Image: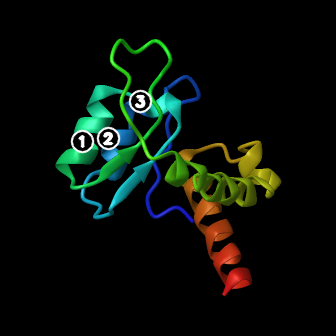
Amino acid sequence: MPVRFFITSGTTADCTVAAQLIEGFQAEYLLADRGYDTDAIILKAVNEGMIPVIPPRKNRKHLREYDEYLYKLRHLVENAFLLLKKWRGIATRYAKNASSFAAAVQIRCIAIWLLVY
């Protein structure tokens, strides 16, 4: 389940706030898809002591190596988002303001944790 999240406008690219999301976290690896393959995110992950497991975009001039086995485990992250989006209020964002939407996400995360544990 999410440990930290930011609510952005619908037109904001996720990769623009990803560096802020990983700031201050301690982890061995940062798993993300090709959409997060930016020099800023990779540099931030390395500075935070993480090994980035992000496949390079196909248009990169210098393709980076990444652990393909670990990348396959990223489906667990996608499954967590799937569980969140099963709640229609989150999937369609019925909440009119950001604080109501954030509260809905937190309540759904608590409900999922209670079901799992």
For the residue labelled by badge 2, is the local secondary structure a helix, a strand or a loop? helix
Against 25, residue 37 (above or below) is above
Residue 106 percent location from the top left of the image: 58, 66
Q: Which is nearer the eye, 89 or 12?
A: 12
Against 21, residue 11 (above or below) is above
Against 9, residue 68 (above or below) is below
Q: Nearer the observer, disc 2 or disc 1?
A: 1
| Residue 44, quarter of the rendered image | top left
Badge 3 local density, few (<14 within 10 Å), some, or many (20+)? some
Residue 52 — which label?
A: none
Check if mark 2's residue and mark 3's residue have beta carbons within 8 Å. Answer: no
Relative side of 115 to 97, left or right = right
Query: How far apart are the alpha carbons under marks 2 and 3?
Result: 11 Å
Q: Residue furthest left?
A: 47
Q: Which comes sooner in the sequence, label 3 or label 1?
A: 3
Residue 91 percent location from the top left of the image: 75, 46
Residue 44 — which label?
A: 1
Q: Which residue is mark 3?
A: 37
Q: Residue furthest bottom?
A: 117
Q: Residue at x 66, y 87 (%)?
A: 117
Amino acid on which the number 2 mark rests in the picture: Ala
Q: Which comes sooner in the sequence, label 2 or label 1?
A: 2
Amino acid on which the number 1 mark rests in the picture: Lys
For the residue labelled by badge 1, is the local secondary structure a helix, a strand or a loop? helix
Residue 5 percent location from the top left of the image: 47, 53
Residue 92 percent location from the top left of the image: 77, 42
Q: Residue at x 59, y 44 (%)?
A: 97
For the residue labelled by badge 3, is the local secondary structure a helix, a strand or a loop? loop
Q: Which residue is mark 2?
A: 19
Check if mark 2's residue and mark 1's residue have beta carbons within 8 Å. Answer: yes
Query: How far apart are the alpha carbons under marks 2 and 1?
Result: 6 Å
Look at the image and tell me in which quarter the N terminus lies: bottom right
